[in-house]
Image: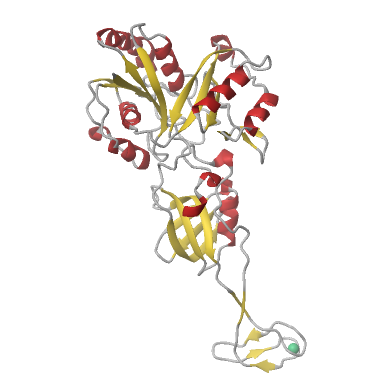
């Protein structure tokens, strides 16, 4: 057997790596079988990345791969190579898109899994890519090799289904049975189908790509049955087929261990984005769209003890993906006047306190008041702002936390 990987075949106005994989599998010469279709998300801060930063692989089973190589050469030349250099600027895109630079690799033996771990946690350049038995194209070979080297022991699933060509060409709105999606969302083995907070549908992409929806699930069977339940509805548009991908989504593979620190300074910036400086020198950022993470960050005061996790950005700040307060510092307040209950004021360093109302004087002192945090456990951004790689908090083993 051998492993085929592809990456970087999508661009904003049409191409789609998952659909390329679907076409390859649909058109495999009949002497070959396939298994373990995989989708991995890679380092979220990679400089050159496509829309979803997902790379795909499939294990192909057969005896002699001569015909397969001919087929892959044809598919590469006809379908993937023409995508090279394509770029579309879109108003909906918040960041600059890199030109598409597709890559495809074939391995007879799986490369060492360390390459995957490097590609999910840091920036990797072409010189570090393990040599494939055969490879096509450019930059996309990094992700294509990363997904082939993914050990995949910890995984979730995503069922992806694609629209018919006429619907893609017409750019018509996607039609998915929302009543049936509610049923699917109630299945505890599916996740992130809907954001209950905003009641928004999370399974359908917004851009003009052939994907009708991608349905995430903890098990293969629930991915398949939920996907079929939706596409068999008369109120869902016709599709060309679906595949179940094993994925590294919701695994936290991109994160290291949780860190712990003591707050030194908190600065609230534009739109509520909050910067926390820790005594250990770590700089943490909670962004405007990070929901409870931002609210907790804004509440913090110097000397609070916190636990946190996130990726280090190019500006050396840790972009928070989860945050917890472990001990809140007491608030120091001046006592009240015994006579008139007005809060006393200091008259200066090493000076007594004085009541601003009756002017009576009292010795220097502080009262310590306990502060009650708005959240006691870990918080994480709302589902529609979470990274694909981030594991939902309620999946974590309560004992280890
Ligand atoms: Zn007084």
Horizontal arrangement in the rendering, residue 56 relative to residue 164 (left or right): left
Horizontal arrangement in the rendering, residue 179 relative to residue 381 (left or right): right
Extreme-right residue of the structure: 340
Q: Quadrant of residue 42?
A: top left
Give residue 381's position: percent from left, percent from top.
56, 46
Horizontal arrangement in the rendering, residue 253 relative to residue 208 (left or right): left
- Residue name at image x 44 percent, y 28 percent: 246
Give residue 278's position: percent from left, percent from top.
45, 63
Q: Specify whether residue 401 is in view.
A: no
Give residue 242's position: percent from left, percent from top.
51, 17
Q: How is the image coloured?
A: secondary structure
Which one is nearer the viewer's eye here, 159 or 340?
Answer: 159
Q: Quadrant of residue 350?
A: bottom right
Q: Specify whether residue 172 is in view.
A: yes
Which one is nearer the viewer's eye here, 115 or 312?
Answer: 115
- Residue name at image x 50 percent, y 21 percent: 13
Which one is nearer the viewer's eye here, 236 or 288?
Answer: 236
Horizontal arrangement in the rendering, residue 175 relative to residue 280 (left or right): right
Q: Is residue 243 above or below residue 345?
A: above
Q: Quadrant of the N terminus?
A: top left
Which one is nearer the viewer's eye here, 174 or 66?
Answer: 66
Q: Is residue 275 above or below residue 69?
A: below
Give residue 230's position: percent from left, percent from top.
62, 21
Image quarter for ligand 1 equals bottom right
Q: Is residue 335 above or below residue 372?
A: below
Q: Quadrant of residue 55?
A: top left
Q: Is residue 117 above or below residue 175?
A: below
């Amino acid at each position: 057997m051998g492993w085929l990987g592809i990456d970087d075949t999508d661009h904003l106005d049409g191409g789609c790596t998952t659909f390329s994989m679907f076409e390859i599998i649909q058109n495999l010469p009949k002497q070959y079988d396939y298994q373990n279709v995989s989708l991995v998300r890679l380092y979220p801060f990679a400089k050159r990345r496509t829309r979803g930063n997902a790379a795909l692989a499939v294990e192909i089973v057969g005896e002699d791969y001569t015909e397969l190589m001919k087929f892959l050469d044809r598919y590469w030349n006809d379908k993937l190579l023409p995508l090279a250099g394509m770029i579309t600027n879109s108003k909906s895109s918040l960041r600059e898109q890199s030109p598409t630079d597709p890559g495809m690799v074939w391995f007879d033996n799986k490369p060492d899994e360390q390459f995957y771990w490097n590609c999910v946690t840091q920036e990797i350049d072409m010189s570090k890519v393990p040599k494939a038995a055969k490879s096509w194209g450019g930059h996309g070979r990094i992700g294509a090799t990363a997904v082939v080297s993914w050990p995949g022991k910890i995984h979730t699933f995503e069922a992806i289904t694609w629209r018919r060509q006429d619907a893609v060409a017409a750019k018509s709105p996607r039609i998915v049975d929302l009543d049936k999606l509610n049923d699917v969302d109630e299945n505890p083995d599916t996740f992130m189908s809907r954001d209950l907070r905003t009641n928004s549908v999370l399974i359908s992409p917004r851009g003009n790509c052939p994907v009708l929806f991608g349905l995430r699930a903890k098990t293969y069977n629930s991915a398949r049955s939920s996907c079929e339940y939706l596409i068999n509805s008369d109120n869902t548009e016709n599709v060309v087929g679906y595949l179940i991908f094993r994925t590294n989504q919701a695994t936290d593979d991109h994160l290291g261990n949780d860190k712990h620190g003591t707050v030194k300074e908190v600065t609230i910036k534009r739109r509520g984005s909050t910067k926390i400086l820790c005594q250990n020198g770590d700089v943490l950022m909670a962004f405007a769209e990070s929901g409870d993470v931002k609210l907790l960050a804004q509440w913090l005061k110097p000397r609070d003890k916190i636990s946190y996790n996130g990726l280090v950005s190019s500006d050396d700040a840790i972009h928070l993906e989860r945050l917890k307060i472990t001990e809140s510092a007491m608030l120091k307040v001046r006592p009240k006047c015994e006579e008139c209950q007005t809060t006393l004021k200091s008259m200066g360093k090493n000076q007594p306190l004085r009541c601003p109302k009756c002017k009576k004087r009292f010795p220097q002192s502080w009262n310590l008041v306990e502060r009650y945090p708005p959240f006691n456990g870990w918080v994480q951004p709302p589902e529609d702002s979470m990274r694909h790689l981030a594991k939902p908090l309620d999946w974590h083993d309560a004992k280890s936390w």
